Structures are given as C-alpha cells and as structure tokens.
Amino acid sequence: MKIRIGNGYDIHKLVEGRDLILGGIKIPHHLGLLGHSDADALTHAIMDAMLGALSLGDIGHYFPPTDAKWAGANSLKLLEEVNQLIQSHGWQIGNIDSVIIAQRPKLKAHLKSMRDCLAEVLGIELDQVSIKATTNEKLDAVGREEGIAVYAVVLLTK
C-alpha cells in the first residue's frame, strides 16, 4: 500500500450579510464568511490537503476566485470534483483530521452534522472524518472574532 499525506489551511473574514457555512452545514450566527464562493473554510482546507497530498496544487488553481463561474459556488460541489480528481489518479481517502479555530459561534453542536455531510459527499465512512473545534483564546484576528481559520490533514491511500 502506498500512502500520501497533505495538509490544508484556510481562513476567511467574518462579515454581516453572509451565511456561515462550515463542512456544508449552515451554522446559525449573525456573521458569515466572506469569499468568492460560499467561503466554506473547512471544506476548502480539506480540498487543499487532498490536492497537496498528490502535488496537484491548490483549489485556487482549479477554482480561481477571478473566474465568475465560481462566484457563490457550493463548496461541496467543488469537493466532489476534487475527490473525483484524486480517484482518477488511483487514490482514495484514508482519513481526514481537521480543526476549526473560531472564537464564536460555539461549534460543538454542529460537528456531527458536518462530519455526516462530508462523509456522504466523499463516499467514505463517518469514522474517517474527524472535525475538532477550538477557540484562539481571544488572541489575534480569529480571537477578536474577525475571522475563522481551519487546518486539515488528509491521508490518501493507493
């Protein structure tokens, strides 16, 4: 068996007038993430980790923010495309481990829904998707509730 590991990172600014979507789940909050697509930072970090594991670049290469085609795009659809790409290279997801850094809102009650959604879209088992949430202890822009950041690691197997 061959294995590859990739890591991903994404951060988006919190603003009024946008939905807060993480892992394909709309989270009730008075602020949402700003971005060209739906700004789902969790899904974006996972996609970058998947692409990075195979040295295939990053999501900006495949879905550039300068292309109007991707404006408001559902990140789960982009995730499906990235998953098809890695499968076309003969690889599959072994597991995903991720952490969302957000001062607010509290995300614990939504983690299972995010895991369910991502596992379904990727066609993998629930126990292959780990999502944790933490705060930044009120430090830096994330701690000041100016944004949400996500780190993800993906193991691919062949």
Image: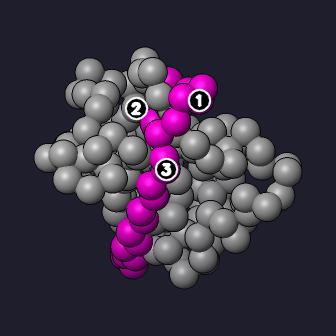
Disc 1/disc 3 C-alpha distance (Å): 12 Å
> In the rendering, at what x and y percent does residue 50 appear?
49, 64
How many dots with numbers? 3
Magenta extent: 1-26
Q: CA distance from mark 3 to mark 2?
A: 18 Å
Q: Amino acid at mark 1?
A: Arg
- Of marks 3 and 2, which one's residue comes earlier in the chain? 3
> Which residue position holds label 1?
18
In the image, residue 112 lies in the stretch drawn in magenta = no
Question: Pointer 3: residues within 10 angstroms few (<14), some, or many (20+)?
Answer: some
**Quarter-of-image position of residue 56:** bottom right
Q: List x then y, in percent, for residue 119.
A: 44, 38
Q: Is residue 77 above or below residue 141?
A: above
Secondary structure under the numbered disc 1 in the rendered image: loop
Query: Residue furthest toward the left?
Result: 137
Q: Secondary structure at mark 2?
A: helix
Is residue 1 or residue 64 the one in the foreground? 64
